[in-house]
């Protein structure tokens, strides 16, 4: 993953300084770096879900999850382009998003099946009464958001490009719900069924320092993110120096 991130950053920077005939090569380097990073993150997620087992089945599952995560990133990117572009590129992005949404559904289904299957404790947290009642809003809302995204993708682009931001917003909401589901499943373990959060925690004094830092830095990061979205909102246009 680190190699992919480094390669990705170098390709992005060098492309802007390269001669025109060399830029396609840097485009491919950027693509490969991004793909390697996404696949590595997905593989780590798959390994984490099944408790870092090393059997052939566990490796195969982690590979499947790695491709699912990469497809999920593609869905986020496609929906971002729908929001930021117009014309031919926007229509192509809608087509990409439809395909990626199907892949993301497969990944969510795969993780949802494997997570309780690998742990009796998680199975009980999901399906025993009354836990199933408490957990049911997450899959119901997630399925509803996925269906809503599919409906909007079929209707876009609309007149005056209305609601072009909805697929991207729905992607964020779905990702948040998936992480909430994973957090609910694994709590209070930091490594599923092996290591408790409290066992992996730092010293109390260290945690207090981190808490103070987080209370200061986190609002700044959230504010900076909202400010960036506010400044750069609207459609992307050709780069000009007036």
Image (cartoon, grey):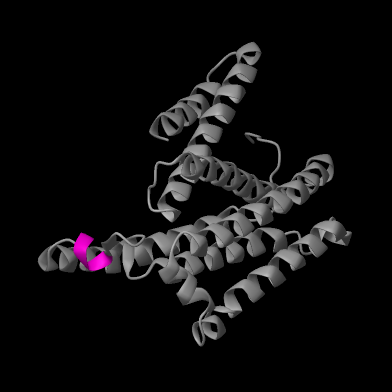
Residue drawn at (37%, 70%) of the image: 187
> As displayed, is residue 182 above or below residue 38?
below
208 left or right of 178 in image: left
Q: Looking at the magenta stretch, what is its main secondary structure?
A: helix
Q: Position of residue 45 (x, y in %)?
A: 46, 49
188 left or right of 10 in image: left
Q: Position of residue 225 (x, y in %)?
A: 48, 58
Residue 194 shows in the view: yes
Residue drawn at (51%, 87%) of the image: 130
Q: Could you say which is closer to the camera, residue 200 or residue 30?
A: 200
> As displayed, is residue 38 above or below residue 234?
above
Quarter of the image for the C terminus: give it: top right
Q: Position of residue 137 (x, y in %)?
A: 60, 79
Q: Quick check: is 199 in the magenta stretch?
A: yes
Q: Could you say which is closer to the camera, residue 181 or residue 130?
A: 130
State how many labels appear: 0
Residue 235 shows in the view: no
Q: Quick check: is 40 in the magenta stretch?
A: no
Q: Could you say which is closer to the camera, residue 112 or residue 32?
A: 112
Quarter of the image for the N terminus: give it: top left
Residue drawn at (66%, 58%) of the image: 168
- To which quarter of the image does residue 146 belong? bottom right
Q: Position of residue 201 (x, y in %)?
A: 20, 62
- To which quarter of the image does residue 67 belong? top right
Residue drawn at (64%, 15%) of the image: 20
> As displayed, is residue 180 above or below residue 21?
below
Which residues make up the magenta segment? 197-201
């Amino acid at each position: 993953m680190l190699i992919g991130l480094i390669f990705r950053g170098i390709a992005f920077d060098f492309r802007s300084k390269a001669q025109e005939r060399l830029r396609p090569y840097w485009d491919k380097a950027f693509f490969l770096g991004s793909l390697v990073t996404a696949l590595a993150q997905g593989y780590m997620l798959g390994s984490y879900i099944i408790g870092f087992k090393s059997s052939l089945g566990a490796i195969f599952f982690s590979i499947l999850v790695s491709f699912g995560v990469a497809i999920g990133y593609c869905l986020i990117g496609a929906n971002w382009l729908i929001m930021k572009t117009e014309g031919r590129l926007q229509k192509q992005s809608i087509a990409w998003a439809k395909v990626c949404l199907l892949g993301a559904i497969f990944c969510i289904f795969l993780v949802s099946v494997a997570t309780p299957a690998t742990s009796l404790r998680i199975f009980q947290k999901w399906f025993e009464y009354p836990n199933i009642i408490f957990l049911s809003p997450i899959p119901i809302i997630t399925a509803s958001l996925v269906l809503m995204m599919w409906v909007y993708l079929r209707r876009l682009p609309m007149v005056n490009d209305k609601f072009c931001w909805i697929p991207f917003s729905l992607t964020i909401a779905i990702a948040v719900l998936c992480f909430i589901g994973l957090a609910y499943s694994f709590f209070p373990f930091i490594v599923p069924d092996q290591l408790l959060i409290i066992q992996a925690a730092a010293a109390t004094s260290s945690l207090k320092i981190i808490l103070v830092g987080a209370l200061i830095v986190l609002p700044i990061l959230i504010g900076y993110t909202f400010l960036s979205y506010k400044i750069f909102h609207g459609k992307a246009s050709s780069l000009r120096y007036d």
